[in-house]
């Protein structure tokens, strides 16, 4: 019985305790929210960034489902904060609370409230104390940026894709035309003729070797030059494979080497293949071909109807303006060849021409020069060994050879020596131009430098004149009455110095020409006259 009473007591106690616990638990669940509750208070908060409401009252909200609310208002610079508890099931100032589940109070502007009005709600204790503006603005800004960028991106993708599709389409068309033997796209050839017409804008295009096995449809016309290694023809480049007047053509120059002169063709082709060589004062190269049937190698280049400078000077006298055009373009061309950087400042391999002479320079229709005949040219690559350089031997044309070349004492250890030898030859060409210029007074018949020597002087006779006698072409006093000629003659004198190291660089002479631009503007063009009507002559290259 005692045991029964004891058990009943403990069961009752346990039951009571569990009921009590349940009550406490439900009370805990029903704990109401603590919120800042100051109703309306003035504030210094400017409505930007984050602010702390100036409310020192924290209240237990009256209703179970109440959340914390803050309202910021700006009514004619009367700025206030409302901090309240409010049930989201009820409207507040006619507004539905939207964001009350948030843990932070993030302000959103509501329009049409009669003043600037921001409201936020949240459901954590005192969460309406620290309020945040602009977060919504940020996302709005991001949204605006995205909205404006997306169409731009879509457009860019569209343009790039269209361009790519167009390129692929053009390439397929061109290759199918080539397969069918249809007319080829000779855009480069056309550029060559634009060059001839005086616009050199195309001269900076990259070099283009004909990698197709197909040969260009070319019709040789007249022989315009004959050298030791090759002959040069004026030719028509037909745009279609069938010969037709309507199909149009471009005029080009074809330098033809026999199979025996393979080395010379290969060297010139390799020099031309360097895209960095391209310059308005260097002959514009189109392509190189092997013509197996004729057992020939061809180089196809721009054609310049005025021919080479020597022919030009034989048949024409020039005025100061012409001299300036010819001289400055010649020096620019040599300077570009020798330079170790392109016009855009990129590194390039310097090249020595090693056969500069007036017959290896062409006169373009605007009376500027371009260098041609790179058969002996040498790429002054740092990787060239002294042996390789030495093997290249004494090359060039004896009449134009620098003293150290005549003596075979060129300093092979220094690539500058090859440039210095070129500068010596360039000085002789400048002398030739001046000798035919009206600005010197009486102009005599054209004579080459060291014209007193026989037609093709050998190395030994040149050694006698240039080394033993230290002879140079004469610069009469009468020549230097003209201020421009005086400056050019002073440069020539510096360029043919016996000591290669003492010579000017081609770049320096080119700059001196540039500085004389003002003299060119003062020049009187009336003294220019043509001596003999222009005709195409075939000249024998002097080697
Ligand atoms: N003689 C040698 N090359 C020539 C060219 N490209 N144009 C005209 N005459 C030339």
Image (cartoon, rainbow, N blue to C red):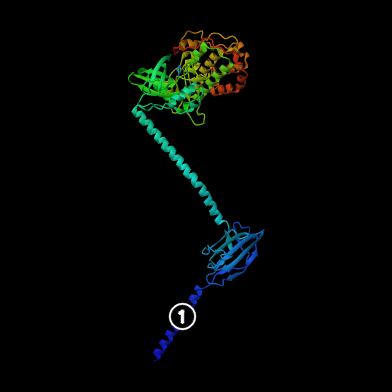
Quarter containing the N terminus: bottom left
Residue 97 in picture, x, y percent from top left: 54, 64
Residue 381 in picture, x, y percent from top left: 45, 27
Residue 273 in picture, x, y percent from top left: 43, 26
Outermost residue on the right side: it is 77
Quadrant of the image occupied by residue 521: top right
- The answer as to whether callout 1 falls within 8 Å of ligand 1 is no
- 212 above or below 317? below
Other-residue count near label 1 (Cα within 10 Å), few / some / many at <14 / 14–19 / ≥20: few
* Residue linked to disc 1: 19
Specify whether 19 is left or right of 35.
left
Visible in this render: residue 259? yes
Location of ligand 1 given as a quarter of the image:
top left
Q: Residue at x 55, y 8 (%)?
A: 444
SS for tag 1? helix
Quarter containing the C terminus: top left
Q: Residue at x 62, y 15 (%)?
A: 482
Decide which of 521, 348 is in the foreground and name it.
Answer: 521
- 328 above or below 117? above
Residue 321 in picture, x, y percent from top left: 58, 17
- 185 above or below 220? below
Decide which of 252, 373 is in the foreground and name it.
Answer: 252
Decide which of 345, 241 is in the foreground and name it.
Answer: 241
- Count of all numbered marks drawn on residues in the image: 1
């Amino acid at each position: 019985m005692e045991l029964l009473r004891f058990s009943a007591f403990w069961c009752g106690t346990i039951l009571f305790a569990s009921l009590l616990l349940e009550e406490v638990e439900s009370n805990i669940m029903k704990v109401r929210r603590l919120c800042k509750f100051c109703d309306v208070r003035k504030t210094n908060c400017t409505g930007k960034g984050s602010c702390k409401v100036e409310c020192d009252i924290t209240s237990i909200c009256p209703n179970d489902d109440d959340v914390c609310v803050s309202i910021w208002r700006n009514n004619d610079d009367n700025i206030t904060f409302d901090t309240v508890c409010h049930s989201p099931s009820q409207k507040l100032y006619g507004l539905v609370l939207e964001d009350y589940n948030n843990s932070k109070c993030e302000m959103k502007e509501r329009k049409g409230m009669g003043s600037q009005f921001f409201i936020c709600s949240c459901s954590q204790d005192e969460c309406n104390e620290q309020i945040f503006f602009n977060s919504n603005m940020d996302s709005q800004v991001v949204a605006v940026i995205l909205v404006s960028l997306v169409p731009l991106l879509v457009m860019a993708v569209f343009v790039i894709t269209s361009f790519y599709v167009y390129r692929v389409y053009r390439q397929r068309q061109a290759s199918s035309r080539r397969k069918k033997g249809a007319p080829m796209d000779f855009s480069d050839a056309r550029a060559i003729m634009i060059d001839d017409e005086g616009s050199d804008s195309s001269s900076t295009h990259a070099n283009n070797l004909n990698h197709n096995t197909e040969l260009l449809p070319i019709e040789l016309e007249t022989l315009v030059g004959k050298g030791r290694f090759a002959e040069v023809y004026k030719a028509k480049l037909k745009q279609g494979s069938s010969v037709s007047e309507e199909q149009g053509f471009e005029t080009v120059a074809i330098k033809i080497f026999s199979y025996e002169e393979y080395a010379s063709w290969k060297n010139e082709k390799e020099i031309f293949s360097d895209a960095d060589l391209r310059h308005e004062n260097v002959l514009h190269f189109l392509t190189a071909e092997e013509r197996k049937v004729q057992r020939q190698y061809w180089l196809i280049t721009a054609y310049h109807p005025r021919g080479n400078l020597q022919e030009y000077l034989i048949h024409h006298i020039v005025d100061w303006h012409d001299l300036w055009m010819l001289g400055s373009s010649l020096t620019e061309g040599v300077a570009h060849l020798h330079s170790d950087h392109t016009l855009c400042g990129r590194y390039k391999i310097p090249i020595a021409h090693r056969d500069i002479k007036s017959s290896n320079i062409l006169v373009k229709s605007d009376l500027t020069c371009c260098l041609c005949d790179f058969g002996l040219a040498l790429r002054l690559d740092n990787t060239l060994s002294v042996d390789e350089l030495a093997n290249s031997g004494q090359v060039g044309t004896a009449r134009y050879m620098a003293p150290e070349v005549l003596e075979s004492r060129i300093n092979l250890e220094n690539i500058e020596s090859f440039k210095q030898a070129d500068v010596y030859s360039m000085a002789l060409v400048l002398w030739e131009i001046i000798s035919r210029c009206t600005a010197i007074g009486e102009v005599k018949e054209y004579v080459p430098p060291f014209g007193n020597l026989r037609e093709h002087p050998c190395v030994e006779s040149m050694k006698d004149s240039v080394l033993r006698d230290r002879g140079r072409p004469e610069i009469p006093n009468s020549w230097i009455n003209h201020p421009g000629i005086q400056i050019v003659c002073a440069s020539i004198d510096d360029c043919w110095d016996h000591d290669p190291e003492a010579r000017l660089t081609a770049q320096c002479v080119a700059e001196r020409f540039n500085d004389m631009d003002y003299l060119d503007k003062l020049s009187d063009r009336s003294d220019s006259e043509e001596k003999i009507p222009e005709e195409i002559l075939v000249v024998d290259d002097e080697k």
